[in-house]
Image (spheres, grey):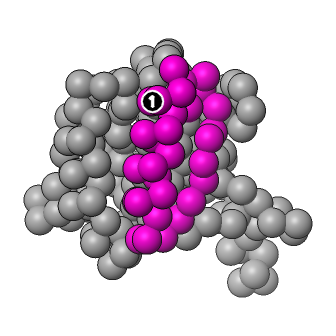
Amino acid sequence: MRLLFSATFCLLLSLSVFGQYNFKQSGVGAVDFTATDMSGRSHHLLADNKGKIVLLTFWSSRCPACKSVIPKLNNMSKKYAGQNVVFLGLTAENETSASAFLRKNPFDFSVIPNSFGILLQLAEKDSNGNLNFGYPAYFLINQQGEVEMRASGSGKTGKIDERIGALLNSR
């Protein structure tokens, strides 16, 4: 009975999360969404970023590796400032939880709370349909709006930086 209740609760939670976003498949593996960041600004992933490279970083306040990569991501966002590169931090946490964490660990780019539905759409699934990702999770979207790279873990920022540079130089 407990298992049935848990499964039903998870299903209902997933359905309510999907209702927060407008998803569309575009290109190879890219997902379009519209979401609001912590400052109230609306982000339309593909429409707002045509011809740009976008790095989506999914993080959690309970993730020590996520906290450790924030300075690296902030440095990377400064490095690419003024170029066609957009950084977005996404978290499944609500505004209150995210705000408390961000006061001590600020991102230098927009943060979108309540983003679990977006992660569900982008994350790869194993052969049983289970989500296959770790925190922090990264999705690098190229200038054509396609997922160029998926990665997770704290040691991936160097590879992401290299790939962003290669994408910028390929034009």
Query: Seen from this angle, which residue lies furthest front?
Result: 169
Residue 39 at x, y = what percent? 20, 34
The correct choice, above or below, for 130 with respect to 79 in the image is: below
Count residues near mark 1 (Cα–Cα under 10 Å), then give few for <14, some for 14-19, many for 20+: some
Q: Which residues are magenta?
A: 142-171
169 left or right of 89 in image: right
Residue 25 at x, y = what percent? 71, 28
What residue is at 72 percent from the left and 56 percent from the top? 124
Residue 112 at x, y = what percent? 35, 43
59 left or right of 97 in image: right
The correct choice, above or below, for 101 with respect to 42 in the image is: below
The correct choice, above or below, for 55 with respect to 126 in the image is: above
Q: Is residue 47 magenta?
A: no
Q: Is residue 163 magenta?
A: yes
What residue is at 51 percent from the left and 33 percent from the top? 167
Which quadrant: the N terminus?
bottom right
Tag 1 residue? 168
